[in-house]
Amino acid sequence: MEEDVKEGTSDKYSLRGRVFSRLREDILNGKYDEGVELREIAIGEELGVSRTPVREAFRQLELEGLIKIIPNKGAYVVGISDKDVRDIYILRSRLEGLAARWAVDHITEEQMEEMEENVYLAKFHTEKGHNEQIFELDNRFHELLYEASGSKILEHQLKDYHQYVLRIRKKTLASAKRGTQSNLEHEAILEAIKNKNADDAERLAHEHMINAYRNMIDNGLIKPE
Amino acid sequence: MEEDVKEGTSDKYSLRGRVFSRLREDILNGKYDEGVELREIAIGEELGVSRTPVREAFRQLELEGLIKIIPNKGAYVVGISDKDVRDIYILRSRLEGLAARWAVDHITEEQMEEMEENVYLAKFHTEKGHNEQIFELDNRFHELLYEASGSKILEHQLKDYHQYVLRIRKKTLASAKRGTQSNLEHEAILEAIKNKNADDAERLAHEHMINAYRNMIDNGLIKPE
DNA sequence: GTCAAAGCAATTGTATACAATAATACAGGC
DNA sequence: GCCTGTATTATTGTATACAATTGCTTTGAC
């Protein structure tokens, strides 16, 4: 499952870009727990590079809020708490609503076709219980929505959040019940956009996020506030 | 006008921190125009440091969206389009509304006091036409709102956007009419929070952003869509 | 035994040296 | 004249060397 994180700002062919992506993924996937100290030399050795690209990656990770650098002391992993997840889902619920609204006016034919195909395929894989494909299709549906909004700013922001809750999302769609329900919600959003109904599109996308969050709580993946 | 930008992520006692802050300010103030290429050695010589801290600052500036680094080629100052400004103000209008809503339940006494003092002082400086102070107080009012939301995620996000449109905002509050109106709006938001009226707080903060955006258009600072 | 100060080890901060890449200029062939 | 390939140069990418800082340990006085 390659993630292709932060396209445009992270160059994956440079050592620094690879270190950045790798560390980002490791932190989001929980390899490094909250509070763990990251040492430049150790990370460098693990990835086979010197301190220079590691340091540059650290500066970026700090700006993203994934680590905290205390001058002359060290770099510490900043965890992502249940409250953070909750906040992100609330922000996302509002911004995804906005994306759906804007998509009504800005979606291209190709995007619409891919979205329809996506919904169709998702139904199939959900019936078969193909979790990996379901996860990928869900990812792609949301990315499509962001791209269809026609706003680079909004797209960038939502992709960021989308990545941020990766760890949680992975576990979420596994339950067959949520999978089926999620598909229905995607389909409803798609229909609203197709029918150029901006109010419905926004409301449905908003509710979709709230439902996703509720599902995480119901499955005990995170604690409610 | 010291900006004290992005406190917590930029350490102003290191060379890198100073390079970062300085470049950031220079770009936001328009010293470097859109598309200008920044050379590591030249910047380093100008500030009396080697390439290392300059490079690290570049990576951070890229993540903030102020410059674009093309691998093996160079770093270029990124402009901010009218559409970007518009999108950001719409996103901000929604998220600031959320921040105001949350602030109703999470604002501390100290924050409330500072906010009241802020509003009071702003009135004074507006009457006197002290543009620099007005700008600083406006900045601080919004930051206070973000901090009062009690959400690290939301605060981080809004501060990001807030910084991003600094270039534009600097010119905006200069007009006396907007200054006065802006103060009244701040006061109304403050009152709503004090009265624990979440709906009003959200609505007023939302409208405040829309008005700020409208004002930029009316003053010809940006073109409407 | 306790506290403080000196020294040591480990780590980050910065400068510099070297490698790789990209842009430019120029020469030669057609 | 124009295209192409090569050499040159300038710039970025990476590694390493050195400086500064921090934390810990050890030592000594009381």
Image (cartoon, coloured by chain):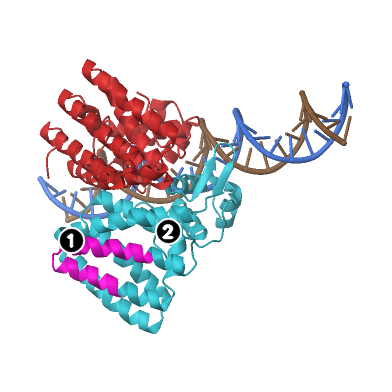
Chain colours: A red, B cyan, C blue, D brown
Q: Which residues are magenta?
A: B184-212
Badge 1: residue crowd in 10 Å (few <14, some 14–19, many ≥20): some
x and y, in percent, of residue B165 in the image: 42, 58
x and y, in percent, of residue B108 in the image: 16, 63
Provide the major secondary structure of the magenta segment: helix
The residue that label 1 is drawn on is B199
Instruction: Identify the element where label 2 is drawn.
Output: loop
Instruction: Identify the element where label 1 is drawn.
Output: helix
Q: On the image, which quarter does residue B124 sit in? A: bottom left
Residue B165 tag number: 2
Closest to the observer, A31 or B49:
A31
Residue A81: in sight, yes or no?
A: no
x and y, in percent, of residue A207 in the image: 21, 42
Say which amino acid is labelled 1: Asp
Residue drawn at point x = 45 percent, y = 65 percent? B217
What chain is tagged by disc 1?
B
**Residue A186 horizontal side relative to residue B179, left or right:** left
Q: How many marks on residues?
A: 2
Q: CA distance from mark 2 to mark 1?
A: 27 Å
| Circles 2 and 1: CB atoms closer than 8 Å | no
Whether residue B196 is situated above or below residue D1 in the rendered picture: below
Whether residue C5 is situated above or below residue A121 in the rendered picture: below
Say which amino acid is labelled 2: Val
Residue A214 tag number: none
x and y, in percent, of residue A100 in the image: 32, 43
Residue drawn at point x = 18 percent, y = 61 percent? B199
Q: Is residue A42 magenta?
A: no
Tell me the quarter of the image containing the N terminus of chain A.
top left
